[in-house]
């Protein structure tokens, strides 16, 4: 290209690569001085709001209000813990399965908040799929985020993912369907989890292009306009004071 | 009372004394392990939502969308900084006056977030009241919370309060009208700030009984049910996923 041409804005896109998603998070944490506690709270709250949009409480029977939230040991799991707390506040009946606990202080505090609010924690996940289908109205998958290998999450999480694949009740994945390659989603979209609802945190990752469920939300209203522009992100408009937008 | 009588639940009330409010906050921070960052984020977000409920963006002219947020050096001011950020995200045009800056890391980070999002900070507040009435659609008072003496906030805050008293544009106070005695509101309700909107954080303080403005909200959906019961609080029902409720 000739240097004489006017500087052109990069073409906007709807998805971030794994490296871009990590860079965006660094920008928020380091340049904007967002705290991890703050971001996890915003993402977890928005995830619970997305669940409530798809499964509004008044439309559910008492049994359908029960939500199994499966949390991994990393960032995604912390968002799951916050999501469970807000679901409780919205009068759903969450139960948490959080088999590989992080020693991180933030995770421990979020766990205490849930425990003190009398949210039950399962000590193991039944392998009999029908038991889970019968006991819960839906499942929130907060096991693995982008760039976290299933092996790193430990055996109980890997086994939980194998169980989640077999469920017939609705599945809501936070950020990416756990176990998918954030970049490609190759193969995973067929062999891996097939969530009904995907809540992309901050912005959709590339693999979300292969998501074929019914509802895709983005929970990234907190992303400053300058950051959105820097990453040439095309994001949906958020209505009113909504913290999530449907894609 | 005879010991044979059944234990009776304490009578529920709508307001907390200053000591009770401090005890409730301690309970959240120490027992429930909420982080200050987390609580300030929840309160500031809910405050911005309350502003948007009373002054919905589509009903405002461009000039009316300008909001002056006056922040003190303590907790109340931190909530104001978060409120300003969310107002920006909701497409209002906040400007911040934050004359006595806290050295606290949380305040500094919240300030950076606002600065990086291009929210203007005033270096002084015009004493000519008409200039403020002309330049802004409304003012958010996040100067002083319960138990903070005006003297402790420093001269610029005291002078700002004197100016706020004279404004004719709508005034929204966070938690308590700045300068009021949280306990009694005595005299203050006549001589002090007279906000149009009051957003009680966590739960209303006693002085809110003397509030005579148009809209009173409580932003305390995050208060766990057990804590509400322990403090025998009668709180309004929150609808759907709303983070504030009108009283």
Image (spheres, coloured by chain):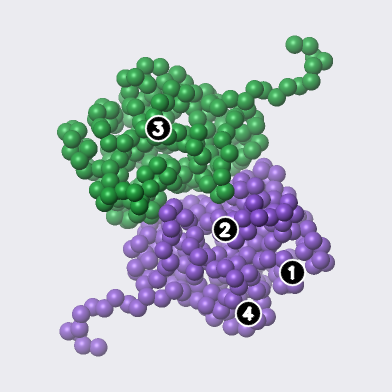
Chain colours: A purple, B green
> Badge 3 local density, few (<14 within 10 Å), some, or many (20+)?
few
Residue B42 at x, y percent in the picture: 49, 45
How far apart marks 4 and 3 lie (CA) works out to 55 Å
Q: Chain of mark 3?
A: B
Chain of the residue where label 2 is placed in the rendered structure: A
Classify mark 3: helix, strand or loop. loop
Horizontal side of residue A182 vs B82, given as left or right: right
Q: Which chain does the numbered disc 1 sit on?
A: A
Give the Cα separation between the discs numbered 4 and 2.
26 Å
Of tags 4 and 3, which is closer to the observer? 3
Q: Nearer the viewer, mark 1 or mark 4?
A: 1
Q: Secondary structure at mark 1?
A: loop
The residue to which callout 2 is attached is: A53
Q: Is residue B229 visible?
A: yes
SS category of the residue bearing label 2? helix
| In-front residue for pair B54/B220 | B54
* Residue bearing the label numbered 4: A188
At a point 28% along the width and 28% down the height, the residue shown is B165
- The quarter of the rendered structure image containing the N terminus of chain A is bottom left
Q: Are marks 4 and 3 in contact (CB under 8 Å)?
A: no
**Chain for numbered disc 4:** A
* Dot label at residue A167: 1
Ranked by sequence position, the earlier of labels 1 and 2 is 2
B27 above or below A108?
above
Would you name the residue on which mark 3 appears?
B214
Instruction: Please say if A122 is above or below A133.
Output: above
Q: Which quadrant of the structure image shows residue A195?
A: bottom right
As rendered, which of B90 and B120 lies closer to the eye? B90
Asked if labels 3 and 2 touch by Cβ distance under 8 angstroms, the answer is no
């Amino acid at each position: 290209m000739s240097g004489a041409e006017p500087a052109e804005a990069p073409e906007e896109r709807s998805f971030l690569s794994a490296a871009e998603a990590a860079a965006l998070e660094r920008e928020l944490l380091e340049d904007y001085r967002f705290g991890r506690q703050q971001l996890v709270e915003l993402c977890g709250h928005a995830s619970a709001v997305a669940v409530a949009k798809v499964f509004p409480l008044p439309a559910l029977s008492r049994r359908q209000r029960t939500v199994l939230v499966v949390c991994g040991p990393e960032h995604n799991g912390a968002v799951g813990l916050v999501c469970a707390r807000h679901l409780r506040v919205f009068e759903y009946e969450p139960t948490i399965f959080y088999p590989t606990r992080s020693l991180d202080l933030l995770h421990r505090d979020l766990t205490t908040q849930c425990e003190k609010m009398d949210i039950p924690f399962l000590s193991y996940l039944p392998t009999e799929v029908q038991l889970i289908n019968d006991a819960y109205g839906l499942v929130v998958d907060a096991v693995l985020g982008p760039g976290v290998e299933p092996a790193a999450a430990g055996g109980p999480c890997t086994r939980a993912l194998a169980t989640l694949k077999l469920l017939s009740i609705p599945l809501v994945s936070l950020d990416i369907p756990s176990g998918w390659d954030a970049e490609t989603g190759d193969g995973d979209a067929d062999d891996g989890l097939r969530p009904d609802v995907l809540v992309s945190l901050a912005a959709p990752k590339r693999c979300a292009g292969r998501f074929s469920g019914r509802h895709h939300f983005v929970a990234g209203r907190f992303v400053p306009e300058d950051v959105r522009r820097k990453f040439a992100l095309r994001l949906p408009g958020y209505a009113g004071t909504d913290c999530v937008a449907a894609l």
